[in-house]
Amino acid sequence: MSSTNTETMSSKRKAFDDPAAVKTPSSQAIKFTSRNPPWTYLKLQLIHKPGTSTTVQSQPLDPLTARTYLNSALSQFLGLSGTTISIDILKISPDSPQQKPTDKLVWVRVPRQDAPAVVAAVSSWIGGGTGGDSVGSVAWRVCAKGNYLGALTQGSGEDLFVP
């Protein structure tokens, strides 16, 4: 009876001591699907009316002015309910005066369900300047729109979730 117990105990599997003997999968494709991302990201460009003075065009866009322009577009298109849409300004570039005045870019994040309304509001808005010819009118151009910031800024985003 005791000989049977020893045979049973000795037949148990043991862990490999040699790490080279352990086989690991060389490369497995991991598929990840997110069907309803909570946010939509927009890349917007501020455009000045032709004929606006170069001193006005070369001034950097500050966050307060960008927020004012965005709120004005939303309130003009959707009324009071448009101003309740949450918009997060992620980045404004460039931060300093620049040579090319057309490079005023704003990256914003909006809730996914509000994105079509925001795109329609900012793309149809033209803000009027009150300072005569020196200020001029401004408008937003939607340069890019997507549900994933990584894919929007760096390409396809296929390497975002690679282990």
Image: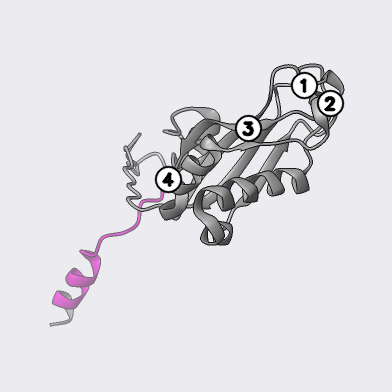
Is 115 located above or below residue 2 in the figure?
A: above
As drawn, the label of residue 52 is 1
Marked residue nearer the N-terminal end (1 or 2): 1
On screen, residue 144 versus residue 93, left or right, reads left
Closest to the observer, 117 or 49: 49
Q: Is residue 80 above or below residue 120?
A: below
The reply to whether callout 3 and callout 2 are in contact (CB within 8 Å) is no
Q: Which residues are magenta?
A: 4-18
Residue at the spot 80% in from the left edge and 25% down from the top edge = 133
Q: How many marks?
A: 4
Distance from the alpha carbon under mark 3 to that under mark 4: 18 Å
As shown in the figure, which amino acid type bears the numbered disc 3?
A: Ala
Residue 134: numbered disc = 2
Looking at numbered disc 2 in the image, what kind of residue is underneath it? Answer: Ser
Label 1 sits on a secondary structure element that is loop
Question: Which comes sooner in the sequence, label 4 or label 1?
Answer: 1
Asked if labels 2 and 1 touch by Cβ distance under 8 angstroms, the answer is: yes
The quadrant in which residue 52 appears is top right
> Pointers 4 and 2 in contact (CB under 8 A)?
no
Q: Which mark is residue 139?
A: 3
Q: Disc 3 versus disc 1: distance between alpha carbons? A: 13 Å
Give the residue number, with chain letter if any, for mark 4: 116
Question: Do the residues under discs 4 and 1 have CB atoms within 8 angstroms?
Answer: no
